[in-house]
Structure formats: C-alpha cells, structure tokens
Amino acid sequence: MDNRWLQPVLERGLARVAAPGELWDRVQLPQQQQSKRPAMRLVWAMAAAGLVLAVLGLRGSRSPLELRSASPAEIQAWVKANSGLDVELAARPAVSVRLLGAHIIPGANPAVEVSYLAGSYEARLVVSKDPGASPLTVHDIAHPEWGMNGERYLLSCADPAGLQIACLLCHPGGAHDVTLN
Amino acid sequence: MEQRLNLSKMVLDAHDREVIEACQRGDADAFRLLFETHRDRVYSIALRYSGNEATAMDIAQETFLKLLSRIGEFRGEASFDSWLYRLVVNCCLDHQRRGRRLAPFLDGLLDAVCTSAESALYKLMRSEREQQVQEVVKRLPAEQRIVVVLRYTEGLSYDEIAEVLGCSPGTVASRLNRAHKVLGRRLSHLREVRGGLHG
C-alpha cells in the first residue's frame, strides 16, 4: 500500500503546539507550597486533615448535583433562575478547569455551590446572598472567603495544591493576579 | 522534519550543562529556563498522545514536577533530550494506566469556533481535519501511538525513538508500519483533499 500521502497528513495533524501559559502556574504552585512548609508541620497538617476527613466521612457525603453541566452559561442561568444569585463564571474557563454542575444549598441564607475539577482536584465555589451572614461552612480543607457585589464567595478544594488551579474558574488567564492567604 | 534532534550526542553543550547543573543545585531561574525551553515539546507530546487538553496539562505538569525532583539523577551520560523524552513518555503511559478521562471529540471543534480570529470556516475545517487525525491516532494501541507521536510530533528517527523507548529500531519500524496501515485505512478520506487545507 502506498502511504506516502499519509506522512504530511500526520505531520500537520500531529504538529507541535504551544503549551498554555497556565502550565507554569501549575508547575510552580506545588514547589512554593513545599518550600513554605517545614516537614514536621506538613506531617501534622496531614494528620489533622486525615482526622477531619475521617470525621466528615462519618457525617455522610456531599449533596448531589441538581444540575449536571459543563457549560458556564447554562450553570450561570440555572443558578440565577433558582437562587437569584448572579455568579459570574468565565465564558471559557481555562483548560485545566472542567465544570461538573451546581446545586442549591437551602436555608435562611440561600447559597449555591458550583462544582468543578481543577486539574485532577475536586473544587467548589460557594456563593451566598448575604455578605454579612455567618461564614459558610464547607467540608474541604482549603477555603479562602471574600465578599463582592453584595455576595459572599467561598472557594474550596480538598487539597491545598489544587486551590490556585481552582482560581482559574473565574481567572482563566492564569493565577498571577490572584493572591491567596 | 526540520526539528530533528541529535539524541545520540553524548556530550551536552556548555550552556545546556550549566543550566542543568544550576537546576541540580536548586536554582529556580535555571528551572524556569529549562521549563521555557521544553514546555511546548512536553505539552505537545502529551496532547498528541492523550488527545485531550486537560489531560495533556495534567501529564505536562507531572512531567515537569518529576523533572524537578529527579534532575539530580541526571548524570549527562545520555543526552538530556533523550532523558526528558523518557520522562514524558513514562508519564503518558502511567496516566493511561491510571485510566484518566478521555477526550471529548467536539472540544477541538468548539475551540476553533470560539476563537475565531482568522477565517472561522478555514480554521474550523483545518481543525476538524486535525481532530480527525488526532482521533484516529488516539485509538491506536499505546505502544504504536507513542511511536507515531515521537515520529510525527517530534520528528525523531527510528534509532532515536528506539533509544527513548528502550527497544530496537526494528521494533520501532514494525510498530510504525502497523500504525501506518491502520492510519492509512482510517484516514483514506483525507487523501483526496490533500493540499486544499494547508496550515
């Protein structure tokens, strides 16, 4: 069989491409976190995290998603229709972010939880209406919280290493301008 | 294949050696330089092997983190390129073994539609053709697929691929030959349009 025509087809179809800029963020973050923590503190943190996870495991699993979707627009519209909250998601999240869906957290202070994968880490963005309400409670370990446009936001991720990648949900250009405490 | 590399060279040039030695001493700037030099290569192999951008990012991240943790083991006995290729190839194969998510076919098409800076139709058609190639390659057995990626994404010779994979050039030729037969059959519809959609 004469396959000479195939070589240029494969060369074009499999050509080298430019790596996304966010790759550096993903490579850099675990190093920074490693260098910030002395070994013993890491051991204690892991032990504490294990304990928390064990306790949470006894308390049951998370609420199931009411909406399963990978579309930012669909999730945004569903959240608005069901909670009145206007959660601004990037129209095209970074390639490391994969939206999973959302669900409403019922209560006196209604909140919504948007679930997604940040790289290989599970992450959630929790938004509630009242910025003055008591802090949102989540089961994950890392959870910076902030107020914006009259709403309270909380970002959570089961693993601190995934937290900066999780920021890419709303900052698809990279985590350079995102500061986490 | 302009980007052919000389993997068989046994001696690194002075600049490469300096950068690698600085990396081994923990110099962050040297690591950044190494990253910038090789990022596209590593990501491209990961993307062409996995067929999925998010998976490729995972593999590329893992490769660079491994590079950082194992750079001290690099003794300069083989070429650095060859060492790096082995690292990324192993990450690709490990990732597949762990059964991470596979590529949805329409992702690439959606990308083309959403980022319409140049002619949207032209870009869509070109992207669709690239996707077809990518999809067919993705269905090859892993040992054939990695040979195809190293050959066509990186332009490596049979001997160089054999060095990276730790097998004989004859094995590489045999795997490539089998892959060509499958690819030729499954991509035969692209034969007629060749030349019409050059990138």
Image (tube, coloured by chain):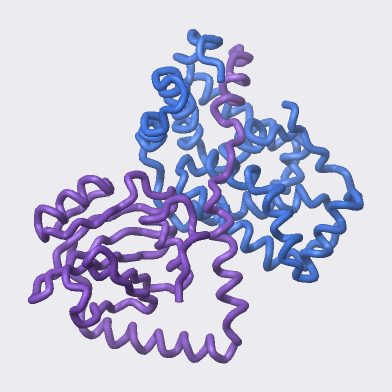
Q: Colour of chain A?
A: purple
Above or below, A140 relative to B87: below
How many marks the image carries: the answer is: 0
Q: Residue furthest front?
A: A149
**Which quadrant holds residue A158?**
bottom left
Residue B85 visible in the picture: no
Q: Position of residue B152 (x, y in %)?
A: 64, 31
Q: Colour of chain B?
A: blue
**Which quadrant holds residue A109?**
bottom left
Q: Position of residue A137 (x, y in %)?
A: 24, 80
Residue at x 57% of width, y 83% of height: A37
Say which of A73 and A69 sits in front.
A73
Residue at x 47% of width, y 87% of height: A45
Above or below, B101 relative to B153: below
Task: Give the quarter of the figure containing the C terminus of chain B.
Answer: top right
Task: Give the quarter of the figure containing the N terminus of chain B.
Answer: top right
Taking the image as shown, residue A79 lies to the left or right of residue A167, namely left
Taking the image as shown, residue B10 lies to the left or right of residue A178, namely right
Say which of B151 and A146 sits in front.
A146
Residue A88 visible in the picture: yes
**Which quadrant holds residue A63?**
bottom left
Q: Position of residue B196 (x, y in %)?
A: 51, 10
Q: Position of residue A105 (x, y in %)?
A: 14, 69
Residue at x 55% of width, y 16% of height: B198
Above or below, B141 relative to B118: below
Residue at x 41% of width, y 55% of height: A171
Above or below, A121 relative to B105: below
